[in-house]
Amino acid sequence: MRQRTTFFHRNEDAIDPASLQVSGRTLSGPSIKAVREDRFTLGLDELPAELQELLRLSQELYIRWASPVPYQAIGPWSSRLSPGLHVFYTPQADAKANVASDHELCLLLRRLGSVECSTPHKSFSRLPNDRFSHSTALEYYQPVYDLSNFVEYVVQYACAPSDAECKTRFDAVKQASSLDFSYDTISHVVKVTSLWGRQHQPLSISAPASHRVEVGLLTPNEPPHLEQHEIGVTGLLTVLGEDSKPAPTMFTFPSRHKQANTGFSSTFLTPTGLHPTMQLHIDSNQPPMEEDSYCALHALLTLPRTIFADKYQLEDTLFLASKNLTALQYISQPVDLEAPDYVMDIWGSSVLLELSTPVTESKEGFTAEIPLHLRYQSPQHGSESTFEVPYPAVFWACAAEEGTKFPSSPFDRINLGYDGLFGPRTLFWHLDPVAKSGSDQLVIGGKVPVLDLDKSRSINTVTSIVVVVGFAWVVYRLLMVYLRTGYGVAQPVKAAEKKQQ
C-alpha cells in the first residue's frame, strides 16, 4: 500500500518550515488552514475477497461520493459533483462475467447505505461512451449523504478489534467532503481518495512500517510561461521513514478542472406543485478565459427518480430562451414520462443544459429556470410527502488551445459523468455552490400531494358506489329504450306496406 497525504494552503496560511518535525516515520507540526487529500493506492491482493472478485469481473469501476455540506476547494481539487453517491461502471465484454459482476456490484453498493440497486442492467442508465472513448458505459446515483456505513465496512477489514487508533483514523472519513474509489484494468490497482475542504487541519501523520507514506505541504505558484490549462505549485515534500527533513519542491502539472472564482445558488420557485421549477442564481455572467476562447456555461442536474425533466419540452428554442437556457445538450435514457415512482427500477436521470448568459461589459448576476416534473409517489399515511433534489454541478466548459494535451497528473480526477460528454481538450471552470439562506445543505426540496391511506378506505367505498350507480343507470336507460322501440322482437310486415315497397 502507498499513501499520499497533501495539504494545499493559500500563501497567507503558510506555516514556518522550521516548526515541522520529522521523527522516524512521523511528521508533526502546528495545525494549518488548508485542503487535505489522502490517497491510498492498493493492489488487488490487499482488498477483501468479495471486492477482489468484483474487480476481476469489471473493466472500469469509479465510485464518487460528495457531501451535501458546502466546502471551500482550492488548488487542483476544484471539480464538483452533485451531493450523493455516484457510480460509473463498465462491465467486461464476457457475458458470464457480466452476470456475476451484476450481482456483486449491487451487493457492494447496498453495504454503503440505503441503496436501491437490483442489477446494473435494471437500475443503471447508459452513458453515451460511443461519443468519446473516455466515458464509462453505465451510470448510477443514489442520494446517500452519510459515510457511516462505508466506514463500518472498511473498519471490519482494515482494523483489528483492539486497534482503537485505526478506528479513530477512519472515523475522520465521516467528515470528509468527498470520497473516490477508482479502478480500471489498465492500471490494475485501486485508488481510494478522501478530501476535506479548506479548514484548520491537524498536522500529525504517522506511517505504518509496511506502508510508503509521502506528505506534501503545497501552495499555489505562478512561474513564468504558465499555460492556462496548468497549475503551478511550490512547497515541501517528505517521505516518512526515508527523509530526515522536508525537501523543497516546485512543479507544474496539467489540470482539466479549475476554479471560476464565482458562485451560484439553487432553489425551487414556490408554490412547487407537481411541476416544480428549479431556479439557479449565477453570481457572474463573465467567462473565466479571454474573449478569443470559446466558453459556455453548463448545469448538470442529477435527478432521483422521483423527479424528471421532459426532453420534448426542453427542445423548444423559444421556451428555452424565456428561461435563460440555450440548449438541452444531453439527457440520460430511458426516461419514462408517465410511470409513477414506485414501479421504476432505474435510479433516475441526468440532464446537461447549456445556460444563456447575458452579454454585458460589466460583471453581473442572472437567473436561469429549469422546468421539472414530479412522479406520483407511493400512498402513505398523510396527504403530503417530501422530495429532495441535490444541487446541480455548474461549470464553464472552455475549449483549450489547439494541440493542448492533458497527460496523467498526480491530482487527476476523471470519470465524473459530465467530462465524458465533452471533447478531450475541454477545460472545466467550476462555480462554488452556496447553500440557500437558512440551510447548511446543498439539497433543495418541497412537498408533493399523495394518496392518504387513512382516507383511502372511504375513497374506495365512495368510488365503488359511484361505479355501481353509474352502471345501473346505463343498464336502466338501455332497458327503457328496448321496451319503447321493441328492438330484438321480429315485427310482422303488413301487406299494404309490402305493396308500397
Image (cartoon, grey):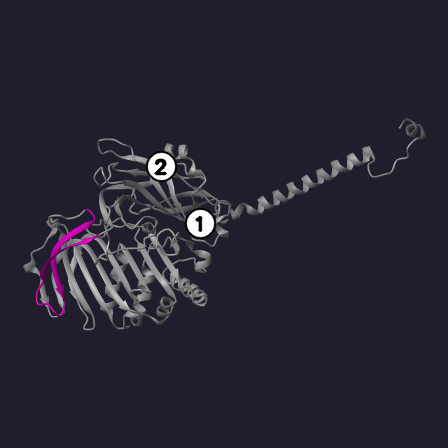
- Residue carrying label 2: 325
Density class for disc 2 (Cα within 10 Å; few <14, some 14-19, many ≥20) is many
Give SS at disc 2: strand
- Residue 210, which numbered label? none
What's the amino acid at mark 1? Answer: Gln
Q: Is residue 233 in the magenta section? A: yes
Residue at disc 1, secondary structure: loop
Question: Which residues lie in the magenta part?
Answer: 228-254
Residue at (19%, 46%) from the top-left corner?
Answer: 228
Q: Is residue 272 above or below residue 103?
A: above
Residue indicated by mark 1: 333
- Foreground residue among 117 and 310: 310
Image quadrant where one finds the N terminus: bottom left
Q: Which of the 4 quarters of the picture holds residue 431? A: top left
Along the horizontal axis of the image, is 274 left or right of 88?
right
Q: Tell which residue pokes out farthest to the top in this image.
A: 500
Res. 437 visible in picture: no
Q: Amino acid at mark 2?
A: Leu
Q: Earlier in the sequence, mark 1 or mark 2?
A: 2
In the displayed image of the protein, which residue is found farthest to the left? 18
Residue 29: quarter of image: bottom left
Alpha carbons under labels 1 and 2: distance apart: 21 Å
